[in-house]
Structures are given as C-alpha cells and as structure tokens.
Image (spheres, rainbow, N blue to C red):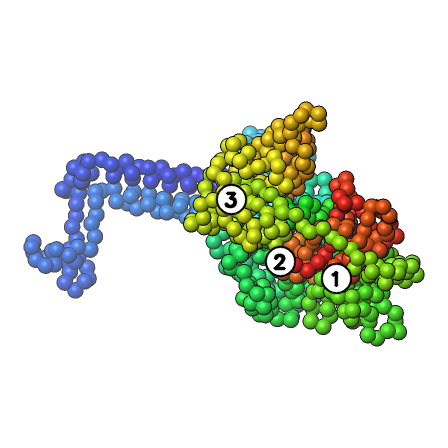
Amino acid sequence: MLLCLVWPWRAAAAAVQQQQQQQQQQPAAAAMPAEEDVRWQPLSSDGGRPSTAAAPGSPGARAFASVAVGGGSPAFKSERAFDIAGFKLAGLLQQILSAHIVIKIVALALVGAPVIYAWGCLYAAITGAPVSLGVFKVYTVVLRAPGARVTEETSLPAAMLINAAFLTGVFTFAVVIGIVSEEIKSKLSAVRRGNIPLATTDHLLVCNWNRQAPLLLRQMATNGHGDSKQLGRNIVVLADRDKDQLDADVARQLNGSGLGFVTRRGAPHSAKDLETVAAAHARTVILLHPDHDPAAEVHKTATLLGLQSSRNHPSTTLRRQRVILQNPEVPASMRSSAADQANHTLAGVVQRSLPASANIKLVEVNGHRNMARLIAQSAVQPGVSTILGQIAQSAPGAPDFHLMDVAALASSSLEQGLTFQEARRKLSNAVVCGFISHADRSTHLNPPDLQQLSRYDKLIVLSHSRTPQLAPGGSTATGLDVAALQRRLQAAQPPAPAPKSVVVVGWSGPLGDLMAGLTDFAAPGSEVFIVGSERPPDFPEEVDDVWQVEGRSVRHIQGDILDREAYERAGVASAHAIILGSLQAEDLKDADARMLTSLLMVQDIVNAAHAAPGSGSGITRRPPHVVACVQFPETVQTASHILTELARTRVTAELLQPGELVSGMLLQVAHEPALAAALSELIDSCKGAELYLRRPERYGLGSSTAHSWAEVSELARLREETALGFIAYDGRLVLVPDSASSMHYGRDTRVVVLSEC
C-alpha cells in the first residue's frame, strides 16, 4: 500500500526531471524567450520596492531583484513544487525500506489504517451499513482474511469499491511478504558471510591461518592428546581469508569428528573482529603465526592486547583463559639465551603487563627452527624423527606426556617428599622423564637420581594411560642386583661410532643448521655430499673440492635433481643416509614435487645397484636410509607408493613433516600448558636433553639372554640417561614397555634414551 501511494509521486518527479533535461539540450537560441516576455524589475536605491524612475544606464538599473521568464512562470513553479514533493516522498520511502523490520511494519500500518478507514466510510455511505461494519468489511478484504467475500455486493459502486480494496490488498500482501523475506534473506546472508557477532562461551578460538592450521584441526578431529572438547565446546576460527574457502578447509579437516565449528572472516588484531568471535569468553585461544606477513609480530601484539582489554568485564574474568602463542621460525644467527628471550620476546613483554585480574595464562610454543638438526640426527640415527612424531602427534598406540603430582606417590607421613630415583621406580607402566619444580616453575628433564623432590612438584610422565599403575612391591627395582648391574656396566665395551656417508639432495639455503647437526651426531671422518645446481651460500669460496668441518668432509656435486650422473658421483647407492628436500622452500607444492622426483631417482638407482643375490653384481651393503622433508600430508601417500610399489630393493625411510610436529606441540600445550618447556627442549632446543638411539653393547646387553625392561631402565640410569623404549631388529618401535616385559637385545636393536646433549 505504501508503494502504491508513493509510486505516482516518484513517477511524476521522474517525468519532470526528464523534461528539464530535454530542454537543456535544445539550442541556446531556441531556449531564449521573446523580448516582450522578459520583464526586468530594477531595485530601488533603498532596497525596497521596484522603482520605475531609474534611468537606463544608472547604477540602479544594473541591479535586479528577479527575472521572470515568459508567461508560464506559475506553471514552472507548480512543476518544481511537484518535483520536490516527489523526491521528499521517495527519500522517506528509502529511509523506511532501509530501517528495521519493526519500523517497516509500523510505517505500513500508519499508511494503511487511514486508507482502510476512509474506504470503510465510503462503503458505509454507499450501502447504508454502519461505519464500523464498513471498516471491518474493507479490512477483511484488504488483508485477505478467511471468510471475506468480494463477489457478494449487489450494487455496482459497492462492487467496484470492494474490488479496488481487494487489488490494494494484493499489493499490500506482496509488500509485507517482500519485507519479511528480504529481512530473512539478509539475516541468513549475514550468518553465512560471518557478519553476525557470535553469542557463545567456553569455545576454542583459533586466530590466523598458516601451514600448521589444517594439521592442527586434523589432530583435534582425532582427539590427539585428549578430548578436544576439553579445550572448548566448539571450535571458532578467525582468519582474514575468503569465508567460503575457510569453511571448506575447516570442514574437510574436521569431517566425521563430530566437532562443531564456526568461522568468521576478519583480522584477529582488530578489536572489532575479536568481539565478533566472543574472544573474551573463549576457554582456549591458539594464536598462530601468520605466513608471509611482514608485520606478523605487530599484529600478534595487537591481538594479545585486544584479548587482554576485552577481559576487563568481571563476567569474563571468572573463568581462566589459556592463550597459546606460536613463535616464528628463528634463524640460528638470531638465537639468544633463554634469559634474553624471556626479557625480549613478545610473550615476555605482554606477560609482564598482564594484570592478575585478567586471569589469562599465556604460553609460548616455538616454531620449527631446529628441524634441520632433527633431520641430521635422523640421518645418522634412523628412527629419531619417527619417535618424536609419534609422541608429538599422539599417534594411535603411542604414549603421551602427562603431569603427575609427587604427593600421589609419596607417603602422607613424609614432609620432604622423595628422591627422583624413588619416584621413577614406583610406576610399572610409565617412564618418569623429569619434573616441574613448584618453587620456580622450572622444567628439569633427565635429572639426577639423587635429586630431591618436593611434595608439590609435578612429575613429567610418559605413558599410555593418564593413571599409571604402581609397581608391585612399591618399586620396579625389586629383585634386581643393582651392584651387579654396575659391574656389568663397567665391563661393557661399546663399539666406537663408525663414520657415515650422507648425501643431501635438493637442500636450498644455508647449510649452517644442517651441518651443525651432522657434526654433533656423525662420527669424525664422515662424508657429506651436497647435490645441487648451485653452491650453497655459506660454502667457502676459497674451497675448490673438500670443505673440512670439525673432522667431517663436505663436497658439492654440481647437478640438478634430474641429473642421474650427479647422484651416482655422490655415491647414492652406497651411502648410509640420503636427505631429500628442504625446510626453506618458498613454493611448498614445488618443494614436494622436487622431493618426489629426487626420491624416484634414488629408488631407481638403488634398484639397479642392489641386484638380486646370485646375479654376480651389485652392492651387498644395506640399502641407504632416506630422510625426506614433506610439506603436505597428502604427499606421504605418493612417497609411500614409490617406496613400496616401485621398489625392488626396499629402503628404510622417514618422511618428516615439520608442520605435524609443530601442530602436535601446539595441541599438546593447549591441553597442558606446563609441558611447553619440556616439548620445546625435546624438539626445538639444541640444549638440554635430547633423544638418542644407543647400541645395546653400551649397557652390557647381549642377545644370548633376555633382559627385563626394569633392568634396562636401571642400566640407562647408571649412564645418567632415561630409557624410553627400543627399536627391535625388525624395525618395530616399542615405547614405554611394561617394566616386567623381557626381550633379547641383539646388535641390530637400538635403545631409545633421553640424554644430555
């Protein structure tokens, strides 16, 4: 009805405007009026009424109050008034249509009620019925109420009036339907596009999107490191990406997990966007380091400050919020001491400024800055990256780190607690790796056995269960002759480590971190061959052939990844280990493609060199161990196809996924923030305790006699190491075996231990 009333005014205004435009386009001569139609009205000298005595050419004759053009001036004024009225009504209509739906309905009622009343009075005058009956009759027809009839009128004027009311009702109904449907459509579009603020609490908020984000969500879907719903009732992702693409990526990773999720497009460093995702009410916040953002640290700082300021209301500080901050990858030349990092890192600065009332627990997780060291260690000690991957990613059947109160193991009568040796011997199906001091919150991995523990300290336990079992008799050392074990250890003669031959293919960027790892783990006399089309940037220019690095020789072999002759000159077929890929590639998809190409070349060369027995040719040494850097999880399937379906000679391989390790650390720290320092020491830091693979001869173990795991654990502790498990002769990895289990430790078996660097 409102449209029906305003539309004629709007159409008339448009017609007048069109007519004026046509007049302006006519020639100037045709537009000028005739001389007799122009009346000049000069002003009097006192500014009053027009003076008729002013002489031509006088100053008064040159000042005019108005100009009247032609005899059509009144019509022009009426058309202009009509035009202004139409535009005003059109503007009012635009304001009403852009207002809230309640205002639209009220405006429609205010316009329709007088019209219905007027038509009702007219109907009563025509038919002689009471006014109330006439108004009700028109009301039912206009609104198309059930029971209203249009064809029962006997007189022509009444029938015409009722039919006009009916047609008006059709348009009115269409307007109402249009208003309501448009409002519903706008709301659904806002929900779909992420424009509506979320009204949710106790959720898990993931800020930013990078290479680890899909892997992090995938591990959440498998409930890695615990029930993901403990981190939040549902998952909310805030990232500055296309909303549809973000929804598709999140849904793909969480498919079949039963976890609910909501996404919003926005910048986490914007306070408005943080308010949109109810950041102040989140139970856990994971702040990822954005890829390819030169101002990433500035944006993360603004995000942390926004989270802090949003929790000023008492209703938000009642619940404690965990904020997990991912630090970027730091080059080796930029690393500093732990104390200096605590003073200058982003989290350190923000943590010192956090008031106690904010009730925020801020934890840092470092990036994959030392993955090159892990690659080097895996090349020399095959299986290390697999062990870390299973622990960090919480693979099926793999143990997990947990925290356990010392008071749960100590007797209630003890006030000073107990020693680390006493604590580690009390659990039969778990390995006590260290403890977190209650006094200074410091983390200690692989501490001395005589270390005194407070009842308020927490043990770092690696186990398959959150509730480890107590050892029978109160100690796993029951029945063991520790003195005899000490004598056996003194009589043990472990073989000296043999030099290794390592081939590196496709490594881009500096060799500093990789060579530092190889010099730490490879024995003196080892050889490293770098296959590449260009010399590494840190390869000395004055060196022509061999670069000596702390007793290890490094050679550069000129050749591309498709140059088979370069592979053969590097001795791929007879090498102990081959490293494929790089950590510093800019194009990740291209990096995986180059790695797969190199892997295919290596497998083909190994197939040809290691001929079948009895052929009279070939190499009798064990095939090389391959360590490959994989950027995308989907690439693992293709690499496995090369290593199985296309292999006539099987090579052992570790497909290292740096993103999986980092995402596993993030998720595990989100579940238990106190483990951040321990995981960082194991995976990120080159200082402190690390994983090592030891030969059985180091502990006086032989294959002729079966040895219990409790015995192996005690022998390792006598070497100031912590035994975590073993790799059997057939490559089977066993972590945290039961203390009573026994097996034969042959020369091909390796004991997994935690030891100082």
In this rendering, the answer to whether 747 lies above or below 411 is above
Q: Please name the residue that numbered disc 2 is placed on.
A: 685
Q: Is residue 2 something one can see in this rendering?
A: no
Q: Which residue is mark 1?
A: 720
Residue drawn at x 90%, y 60% is 478
Please, what secondary structure does the residue beneath circle 3 have? strand
Kind of residue indicated by mark 1:
Glu
Q: CA distance from mark 1 to mark 3?
A: 37 Å
Identify the residue under disc 3.
Answer: 555
Earlier residue among tags 2 and 1: 2
First-in-chain label (2 vs 3): 3
Residue 323 lies, in percent from the top left, at: 64, 60
Q: Is residue 692 above or below residue 657?
A: below
Q: Quadrant of the C terminus?
A: bottom right
* Res 93 label: none
Query: In front: mark 2 or mark 1?
Result: 1
- How many numbered discs sit on the rendered protein? 3
Q: Position of residue 598 (x, y in %)?
A: 56, 35
Q: How crowded is the residue under tag 2: few (<14 C-alpha within 10 Å), some, or many (20+)?
A: some
Circles 2 and 1, Cβ within 8 Å, touching? The answer is no
Local crowd size for mark 1, using a 10 Å CA cut-off: few (<14), some (14–19), many (≥20) = some
Q: Residue at x 74, y 50 (%)?
A: 695
Instruction: Decide if residue 155 is on the left or right side of residue 61.
Output: right
Q: CA distance from mark 2 to mark 3?
A: 28 Å
Q: Nearer the viewer, residue 182 or 325?
A: 325
